[in-house]
Each structure stands twice: as C-alpha cells, then as structure tokens.
Image: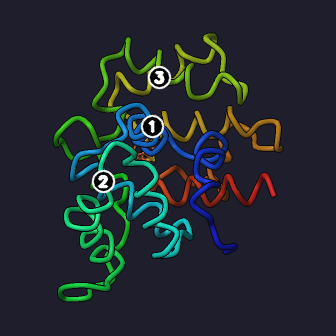
Amino acid sequence: GDEIKAEMVDELSKKHFPLCMRTLHENLRRDHHLKHFGRLQYGLFLKVLGLSIDEAIAFWRKSFSRITDDKFNKEYKYNIRHSYGLEGKRANYPAKSCQQILTPGPSDHGCPYRHYSPENLQTALLAAYSSRGLTSSDLPEIMAMVKTDHYNSACTRVFEITHSAFGVKKGEGVGGNDSVTHPNQYAARSMELLK
Ligand code: SF4
C-alpha cells in the first residue's frame, strides 16, 4: 500500500484502528511510553500497516518525548530495528493475530474485548468510536457477544457499525462476511473503504 508517515499515525488510529491498537496508541500518547510487549505488538502492527523503518524510528523517538536521544538510541532503537529484521537473526517477524493477542497476558497489550471489565470496555468503546457512529444503544448487543466469549464477533460488529456510513452492513464483516481475525486485516479493510 501507500507509505505511511510517522505524523499520519494519530489520524489513522482514530479512523481505522481496532480497539486493541487504538488503546495502545492512546496509552502511548498519555504516558509518552509503552512497556516492552505493548511496544512490540504495536510496532509490528505499524510495520505491517506500512510504516518504514525510518518512519518507525521517527515515530517512536517523537512518542517517547520524555527521554534523551542517548537513552532512546541505547535502549529502544535496536529493538525497533530488530523487529524490522535488521538486527540479530534478521527474522521477518509477522504482526500478532487476534488469537495471539487474545491469549491471556499482561493487561496493557491484550484484547480489550476480552481483558477489560465490562464497564471499562463500554467506556473505551464510546470514547474511541462515538465520533464514528457508535452510540450507547449499540452496546447491549456488543456486550452480549463479549459475555459469551465471542470477542472477535464483538470487534467485527464494532467494525460494521463504525463503517456503516461507508456502505458496510451488519453481517458483512471485514469483507466477504469474514470476522476480524487480525488487527491488520481490520485496519487494512477500513483504509480501503475510506479511500
Ligand atoms: Fe484487536 Fe482482534 Fe481484539 Fe479486535 S478482536 S480488539 S482486532 S485483538
């Protein structure tokens, strides 16, 4: 796809990201930091979204605004380059799928549909998506899916609701009636629809 620039990420996050990545972005902006696993998960997502290594370094350097260049270069730059396959064993690391993110782990980088309390999830959903058409009357249906452990279905329904202005109907999912199985699939489909 088109190249994504570091300064585009704020807007892309608001328009196109699923709640897991939206949450990591908001946490990064709030704390000017993300812990290791959140950084890894979000960094790989942004890589697959189309952020080049140079733009990734620019993005993280600017985001970690409370540390010195020296600390950034020593403690973070290597790991960013590593995740792009430019250090160590030079592996082409894929971005994490929903299934990997849904596997219970430290709470700062999981799937909000699974790992948040019902109250926090509803607050987060309205904060993230009311500007894209989600209202509190949509919440009971979403929460019923969450309650029966259908996290991907809940995320898919949120996608449908927040893209209804772009022609997406309930049941169509992220195209071809597919449910969300990967955060990058969610974001890529959203970017395609809003082009
Ligand atoms: Fe992210 Fe997948 Fe959870 Fe949606 S279902 S919030 S894409 S991990």
> Measured from the top left, where is residue 134 in percent x and y?
66, 23
Q: Which of 97 and 147 is in front in this view?
A: 97
User: Within 8 Å of ligand 1, the CB of disc 1?
Assistant: no
Q: Earlier in the sequence, mark 3 or mark 2?
A: 2
Cβ of mark 2 under 8 Å from ligand 1: the answer is: no
Which amino acid does the dot numbered 2 rest on? Thr
Q: Determine whether the residue tagged by mark 1 lies in a helix, strand or loop.
A: helix
Which numbered mark, 3 or 1, is in the foreground of this view?
A: 1
The amino acid marked with disc number 3 is Ala
Label 2 secondary element: loop
Amino acid type of disc 1?
Answer: Arg
Left or right position of 90 against 148: left
The crowding category of the residue bearing disc 1, from other C-alpha atoms within 10 Å (few below 14, some 14 to 19, many at least 20), is some
Q: Which of marks 1 and 2 is in front?
A: 2
Q: Residue at x 39, y 36 (%)?
A: 151
Instruction: Using residue 135 as the reference point, say whether residue 27 is left or right of it.
Output: left
**Marked residue nearer the N-terminal end (3 or 1):** 1
Mark 1 — residue?
29
Location of residue 186 with respect to 26 vertically, above or below: below
Q: Nearer the viewer, residue 137 or 76?
A: 76
Q: From mark 3 to mark 1, how far is it between C-alphas?
A: 15 Å
Distance of mark 1 from mark 2, alpha carbons?
17 Å
Q: Do the residues labelled 3 and 2 touch (CB within 8 Å)?
A: no
Tell us which disc is closer to us: 3 or 2: 2
Give the labeled residue for mark 3.
Answer: 124
Q: Label 2: which residue?
A: 68
Asked whether 153 or 132 is in front, the reply is: 132
Location of the N terminus by quadrant is bottom right
